[in-house]
Image: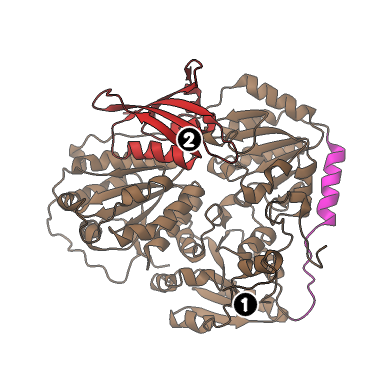
Chain colours: A red, B brown
Amino acid sequence: MTQLLAISLDNSKGSLLRVLGTIERRGWDILEMDMPCKGANCLRLNIRITSNSHHGGSVDTLCAHLGKLFCVHDIEVNAQSSSIQQIHASFAAGPEREIVQ
Amino acid sequence: MTKTAPISTPEAGKARPYTGAHALIDALKAQGADVLFGYPGGAIMPVYDALPGSGLTHILMRHEQAAAFAADAYARVSGKAGICLATSGPGGTNLVTGLANAHLDSVPVIAITGQVARPLMGTDAFQEVDIFGITLPIVKHSYIVNDSAEIGDTIAEAFSRATSGRPGPILIDLPKDVAAGPARPPDAIDHRTYKRASTATHQPDKIAKAQAMVRAAKQPILYVGGGVAIARAEKALQAFAKASGIPAVASLKGLGAIPDGTPLFLGMLGMHGTKAANLAVQDCDLLICCGARFDDRATGRLDGFAPNARILHLDGDAAEIGKLKQADLAILGNMDEVLLALSAVKPEISSWQAKCLADKSLYQWRYDAPGEKIYAPALLRRLSERASSKMIISCDVGQHQMWVAQHCRFTRPQAHLTSGGLGAMGYGIPAGIGALYAETGAQVVTVTGDGSIMMNLQELATINRYKLPLKIVLLDNQALGMVRQWQELFFNGNYSEVDLSDNPDFAALARVFGLDAFTISKQSEVDNAIDRLLGCDGPCLMHVEIDPMANVWPLVPPGAANHTMMEEGPQP
């Protein structure tokens, strides 16, 4: 099934490679991608992907893996034409983002 | 145990400029670092220049891979991040196996690599490789430090990220000119302190549902994985197991979380698991997965794993929920809290307990092997019974690794160091070294094979240099035993490239490195040999000749369900 992911991420060294590598390693093919300008410190990636996984890994699992990347801020999933579903819940475990002065 | 190298030449008292390397050392000390495992080289030389007199203990390993493995074991035993150092190029690439190992087993390792100077990066300079790019898939996070002012914060953040949540390795690539260039001392830097994010569960609805599932179960099983030790939730798990009376099985990395000897602990499950454990999982109606990840070595054919069970999955990592097996209920977060909440429930399962105990008794291990040859499982059982309560066993990979898991008695997970996810031969001896630095007074035994020991044999020199009291049990079947076993069983006995009958004289080899060493080959020698090994003050290698055709039993064939395990004797 084709999915459209909209990912906000740091504009930091390696962040694109981490995101794209995670998607491919977790059993998904990238069909289409664009990166509209968002700002100096934050990138926005729109990626259309399809699963090539023999075990049928879910997009929720993929998003949970992406959510563990420290460079990823936010992911939105749009399954085909259905409405965009925010999946902040994937970040509930909080990849240790708290910083205390 | 000597903690410093015999050759160390700090220029005490001489004022030197404060560099990025000094900032690195100070940042490591600020995080509580005490021991580093490493190997110097060109691009990391400024860091090595700052090391003497720094107060940090550096252990000079003889290969960067071994440095990463030692740091890994140090972390597993101490609960702190382990640190390894290497230079650019081959130094970094030699770390890769160790980082992959830490990644797959969720171990907090900080790897610091030298890099060529910034103006040379991207020019294919001498010893330049993109170690940042090479390691992206096998680290939790990574950094290239382009400014000495970033060093303090980078190190602080790296430690926080390595150790929090699901732990993992962090790579920090440090260009030589940043390390060698001027830096501000720490009192002029605004150091941030990081702390673990809260993993409080606060999911009362889910806990109530979980309690209801446990209450309704007639044949529940606890499936314990390495996540329990990562969460330091052993006590809560043991309390829940005791209060509920639910029988338990463990994955390779879950061993020790419920002490061996606990009556309702049925042993390891999976490919080389006990028959009682695999049958219990097959028959259970509720599988309570605690920090395990449904690895293929544990589950066998996935659709045949716990086929009649509802799944209650407790984990600290959202990405594990539903990754391979859909859970009927998943609770993410603090495992301690959930297990303690579940301890209030006491299911009525007396007939199930009786069945599990009967299976455990019926299928218990037998050690009465006929003949004069040494039966490795019996030797390992004896070793583990004779060792002190502070025993830690590190093992390599292959048949002996499975025999250790089956036959040694573990009462805490930190006592069993094994390369579980990656299955990296060569792990055992460096891991033994790391464990000795992690726990003062531990009795550390490395169990290795004649294939595995050759993967990091050079570390015998490290053991001798630092006079580490590591005990090594080398089970020598003159073959790559596990591969030979699979060729016998699944490749029609076509033994291809597994013969190691031209092995060197391992005892003589160990003596050349300065270790005490001896060889045994008969059952009657085992007891005295174990006494000699464990009684030796310094490092000692016991070379054990075993039957080249010995197999690990039982065995679940690849792609089969766990209850279809093959057992010793003629196969149907």
User: Does residue B247 appear to the left or right of B389 in the view shown?
Assistant: right
Any part of residue A100 in sight = no
Q: Which mark is residue A79?
A: none
Q: Quadrant of residue B50?
A: bottom left
Residue type at tag 1: Val
Q: Which residues are magenta?
A: B349-372
Q: Nearer the viewer, residue B192 or B106?
A: B106
Residue corresponding to mark 1: B544
Residue corresponding to mark 2: A65
Any part of residue B122 in sight = yes
Residue type at tag 2: His
User: Does residue B378 appear to the left or right of B534 in the view shown?
Assistant: right
Looking at the image, which residue is at 82% across and 46% down?
B356
- Residue mark closest to the camera, 2 vs 1: 2
SS state under label 2: helix
Looking at the image, which residue is at 44% across and 59% down?
B70
Point out the image quarter for the C terminus of chain B: bottom right
> What x and y, as percent, mark residue B193?
33, 34
